[in-house]
Every structure is written in C-alpha cells, then in structure tokens.
Amino acid sequence: MDSIIRIENLIFEYQRDETEKPVRALKDINLEIKRGSFTAVLGKNGSGKSTLAKNLNGLLLPTGGTIYVNGYDTKDEEHIWDVRQSAGMVFQNPDNQLVSAIVEDDVAFGPENLGIEPAEIRRRVDKALNDVNMGAFKGKAPHLLSGGQKQRIAIAGVVAMKPSCIIFDEPTAMLDPKGRNEIMKIIQELHAEGITVVLITHFMEEAACADRVIIMHNGEVFLDGTPEEVFSQGEKVRSVNLDVPLAVELAAKLREEGIDIPANIIGTEEMVEYLCQYK
Amino acid sequence: MLRDITLGQYFPGNSWIHRLDPRIKIMATLLFIIELFIVDNFIGFLIAAVVLGIIVAVSKVPVSYILRGLKPILLILVFTFALNMFMVKGRILWQWKFLHITAEGLELAVFMAIRLILLLMGSSMLTLCTRPIALTDGIERLLSPFKKIGLPAHDIAMMMTIALRFIPTLLEEADKIMKAQQARGADFETGNLMQRAKSLIPILVPLFVSAFRIAQDLAMAMEARCYRGGENRTRMNEMKFKGRDYAAIVMMLLFAAVIIIESKVL
Amino acid sequence: MSIQVKNLKHIYEKGMPTESVAIEGISFEVGDGEFLGIIGHTGSGKSTLLQHLNGLLKPDEGTIVIGGVDITAPGVSMVDIRKRIGLVFQYPEYQLFEETVAKDVAFGPKNLGLGEEETEERVKEAIELVGLDYDDIKDRSPFELSGGQKRRVAIAGVVAMRPEVLILDEPTAGLDPKAHKDVLNMIEEVHRRTGNITVLVSHNMADIAKLSDKVLVIDSGHMVTMGTPKEVFSKREELSRVGLDLPPITNLTEELRQRGMDIEQTILSVDDAARQIAEYLKDKGHNKC
C-alpha cells in the first residue's frame, strides 16, 4: 500500500534566542503514514507531537532528514503549496484559525488561495459545510457560534481544499464533551470517505478510534502499533505520564484481584461483553 | 457593555442594499459624507435624512440596532454639542455667570449634531449591509489603480478583514480579563485619573499577550491554508456590475445633484 | 461558614428585545468545609451562577447569604465579598500580567489593602499550596512557564486572598493528562489544608464524582437536581435528558448491571468497580476466567 507521508531521519531543532544552544525537539524520527489510514499521535505536552504535526505540512521545516508528502519534499519551495494543499491542518484553538467574519467566506479562503474558479469554490464551500452539518450557518458570524461549531467551520475550510490528508492538532482540547463528540464523529466520517487522518490528541478514548497509535516521548517515537498493541502495555503508557483507556485501567485492577483479563481488551464495550460471558 | 458596540458590524440580510456591489456602496457612502459637508441648511439635512431613511427601510436593518451603534459616540456628541452651544458668540438667549447660550451657538450645535449623527448612521449602513469580505474586496478593487504607485491594496484589504473578524473576539477577551481582575479585587471605578490609568495595566498586558497569541495562531492557520498574498488569488463572489448597480449609480448622482442645487439655491 | 442561595434569578439585557433569562429559581445550601461540584453543559447558566456568588453580577431576584452576610444587599462592600470569595475563571493563565510570579500572585492581596509583610507571607503560602517551589519560581516571568505551571500560578493568585469560598470554573480545561491530575490533586490539597468551601465546575464527571460532597446539576438556567454524587449519578435517565453523562466507570458498571450482573448500583470509582466485579465473579466460581 502506498504512503501519503514518509518521514526519513527527521530531526528538528529550534532556538529560543540567538545566544542559547538549540533545543532538539524531534530526534531521528522515521515513520510512514499509509494512504487512507487513521493514525493517532499521543504524548504529553513537550513530547514533540505538535512540532511533528507542523513539520508534516511545511509550517516547520526539518533541521535534518526529509519528509515527503504526497511525493513532494516539504523543503522543496516550488511545491510547498502542493504539500499544504495535500496535507490540510486543523488547529487547537477554534477562535484563532478563522479568518473571515462570515462562515462561508471563511470556508472559501483556502480554495481562493489556490486560485480555483469561483463557481467551483461555491460548490466546494456548500459541500464542505454540509459535510460538517453546518450548512444552515453559512451566513453567520463565527464569534456567535459555540466552540464545537467553530471547529467544524475550521474543518470545512480544510475539506474545501480537497486534501488527501488532514492533520488535526488537538482539535478537541478546548471543547466541552458535546463539542468533542461532534468533532470526533466528523473525523471518523472523513476517514470513512477516504481521507487520511492524523490526529494529535491527549484523550485516550479518541486515540482508541484510530487504527494506529503512536506515542511520542521526548522527541522520539516511544510506542507504535494498533490501539490494542499500544494500550495493552498499560505500564509503559503510564510511565510517560499518559492515561490508559478505562477498560485497560479496570483490567489491571481486576488482575490484581486475581481475575485474568486478556490483554487485547481496550474498549469499554469489549470489556462489558467479556465480563458478561461469566455472569 | 462592550458587546453593545455595533459600529463596524455586519447585519446579515438579503435586501436590495445588501446585494449591491460593494464598490457602489463604498462610493455612495463617500459621496454621502461629502454631501453632508456641502449641505449648509436644515432642508438639505432633511433631504439627506429622508434618503438615509429610505436606505434603512429598504435594508431591513432594525433602526434600534443602528441607534445602538451610536451609543459609544454619545459622549463625543454631547461634548461637541456643548462646545458649540457655549462657545459661539452672538445674540444671547440665556446666561449664568460666565456661561452663555447664543441663538447662533444653539443653531450651530444642532446643525453639527445632525451632521455627526447622519454621518455615523450613513457610514454604519455601509458596514451593516456589506459582508466584511465583500467590503474589503471592494476596497481592494477600488484601490487597485494605485498599486502602480506602490500601494499594497491587497494587504490593506486583508488587514481590514482580519480586524473586522477579531474585533468581537478581542472585546470578549477584554471583558473576560476585566472580570477576572475584578475577582482579584481590582478596582477600575474609583481613584483619580492617574490611579485609574494605572488600574488598566492588569487589563492591557493580558490583552496584548492574547492579541499576540491570536496573531501567531492566525498567521500559522493562514499559511497552512495556502495563503500567499494577493497573487493568483480568486474569489468565490466575483464582482460584476448588475442592473441594480447601474440603477444605484443613477440614484446616487441624482441625489448629489439635488443636494448641490439645493445648497446653492437656498 | 456556609452559603445559602435562595430563589436566584438573573435576566440578561433586561428591557431589550434580546432579553433572556439566564438563571431562575436556583436555591441551594453549602455547609461549612464542603466541596460542591456543579455540572451542566455549556450555556446552562453555570458561569452566570458563579459570577453571582462572587458579586460580579447582581441578581434580579433572590438572595445569596455567605457566612451570614447577604451579598446581594445594597451597600455591601465588594472588597468584603472578594475577601471571602475567590473566583478562578476558565483559562486563568490569560490574566497573568506582572513581571514576576511573586508580583502577580501579590496583586489580589494588595488590592485587599494588606501590608507588604502580610502580602509576602500570603504569596509564599499560596505558591507553596499550589505545589510550586517559592524560591525557585518567585522571580521568574509568568510568561515563560509551562502551561500547567501558569495555571497553578494563576490559581495561587486567588488562593493568596485566603478566600473562605474558592470557586473554580473548569480549572483543568485544555491541560494534558499529567497536568490535569496535578491540578486536581492540588485543588483537593488546598481544600483539605485550608478547610474552605470549594465549588468546582467541570465537564469531567469522574473528577466531580471523586471530589464532591454534593453535586448540583443545572440545565437551561434551572436546577435539575442536587445531592451526593451517589444520589445524583443514580439518576441516569434524568441526566441524559439534559445531555449529561455518568462518570465512565459508572456507565460501565451500570451496563453490567443491566446485563444481569449483580453488583452495587452507582459505583463511582474504578477501585470499587474492580473489587465488586471480582467478588461477583469469584462467587460464581470463576476464579480464573
């Protein structure tokens, strides 16, 4: 299967100011993201996960190594707009990423930058807004919407650019549970439509929706595998200051009580199913 | 309190005025402002007020909404009114110690107040009935002939778009910060001018920090969405003059002619 | 020290065509040293209620009596109210403004009119209460700290006013799991050591269940129910009708009960759940399953 993103020996360093020694935020990362996959990237603040995300669409450029997005090297200035069009990005703060004071004009912003025909922009904007269930709000001002609604507009703005891949950088961190559910639903729908999803998060339940989980720690890939493979290593996950899903936590405590629970149970529903066999 | 400010805000709608080409509306507003300064008698103002009234009625923007936008400038209005009323020499109507009101002063005060109110209502109609993006697009297009002499028309327009988008966000932010500092015992209402000015620091510093954070986030989000200045950019809503726009031009010119003739004749 | 809220009502933009009732008919009591959790989704009127408790908003109807003083009465000094009631807003780090951490934390105490010595003592106490090292952090700029540290410094700024009632609006929003846990433990610790009344507003049902003595549920400006976590979270249907979830572990154990597993109702902690499930399974003879 072909890869939409290929990261080879990625190193990223930054300097707080001129006199200081550069800080190495990412240390020799090698990853491939398959086309159409759903990857969750976890890690506590400062683990390098956001830096990695910003490297994936050329907002930051590698200090060492190379990243290919849709075949384009992110360092290749000639193709930087192809890179950004291929890999769209949704950020954490829903307020600070909307450009226009009218919802539909904001969604049109990306396609307009790409120089697309007006009639085609109109079609894309309407479709993107419908995709995120915000069609009824196209004439509204963003500051009157809830956090979850604003974030949906931000997603529509990226969808309208027809990216092959969308990188979500903690899109639900500032939302309430309702907004969080809405966004997760949309992310799953977009994935089902064939868009490659990279979701940076620190909510374990969200990561459990993915088909691959990568845990970052101190600028390195600490764990990488299916959600089952990663979360079954509860101790390791906790050792880098992350939580484990509820079912994994409960399984660990049940084992202490002398009840054996298979390691591959990581979801609440699976746990209920498993326990109910023995009632 | 801060949320009451409607100046510069858009009022969504689909009226004839809303659908006019933004370039027409900008030109019409400029013309209206110039005309207000040409007018030198009350009948002229009456004509201007009637025209404005018709525009408001057609736009379907509630009058109360427009009036609310005048609230922030009420102080300026009262101040200029008082200044004119007391400072102009002439036939004295009323006197108390050194203060005196003259007939000429009163007339000028009323005259200037009407001019200011019409000016503000007229220009707020522009922003109320024009989507911010259309407005900035219009300005960009109107300024584009000046690109040749190095005027960054697109950048000016973009800056205005962003300002319009973030005014409500920053007002909300200011409101939040103010409340938070009040909860920590800050007092903005008492003390002399110096103390009051000093008490603004706990609001202004966090507000600047927020503004910088927003600017940073926004710049990154815009870059991620392939923003690279005005070159090769297209627009979802193309600007083309339609029938109603030509009709508006005719009406504009007619109105201008009436005002000029009226102020010459009377 | 106790709080009595009676029949509170607040209308926004009274007399305007956009007038709306934010809260209505809210009545509850909080006893000395209690920990009150408030839940309700965004826009339910939680923030409006909190701002009343701190005197930032005045009710259109009803009274709030705190420690025997009616803070809604005309002529009550705001300084007195704020001496007794501290309010920590959402994302409180956005209100930091001073050059150093110590100066920022001192802002509140100074506004209360305290002298240099007393202020310094309180600043030191507050910074240590929120789990930071005073000598290490006092001269640093608040803007160069990590997200979790900034949050703590901001909370210290309110704690330093030694409020008898400490109100926190979503104090863990936007933090990573580690910082979330740290801030939560810190709140518990401050509550334990100062014996104050703590009011916590949160969307995280597990946190509410763990910390609260009483839970108040509000929806569209009205009180839905109030009681111990056990009482409140036993009303699954009622909560779901106003769009609120049970704590995840309670959800799981209730599911097991519905499927016929005989365990206690409304289990609120993972430890409890594990113990009960294990006991049940062992009774059934499934020592090793």
Image: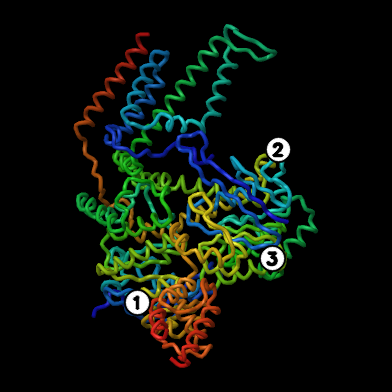
Q: Residue B96 vs residue B210: left or right?
A: right
Residue B75 occupies which quadrant of the picture? top right
Residue B21: x %, y % from top left: 27, 36
Q: Nearer the viewer, mark 3 or mark 2?
A: 3
| Disc 1: which residue | A66
Residue C146: x %, y % from top left: 57, 67
Are labels 2 and 1 assigned to the same chain? no
Marker disc for residue B192: 2
Residue B200 occupies which quadrant of the picture? top right
Please determine whether, in this image, residue A256 is positioned above or below residue A172.
below
How far apart marks 3 and 1 lie (CA) works out to 45 Å
Q: Chain of mark 1?
A: A
Q: Chain of mark 2?
A: B
| C120 or B211, nearer to the observer | C120
Are labels 3 and 2 assigned to the same chain? no
Residue B105: x %, y % from top left: 55, 13
Q: Amino acid at mark 2?
A: Asn
Quadrant containing the N terminus of chain B is: top right
| Disc 3: which residue | C127
Are labels 3 and 1 assigned to the same chain? no
| A202 or C257, nearer to the observer | C257
Q: Amino acid at mark 3?
A: Ile
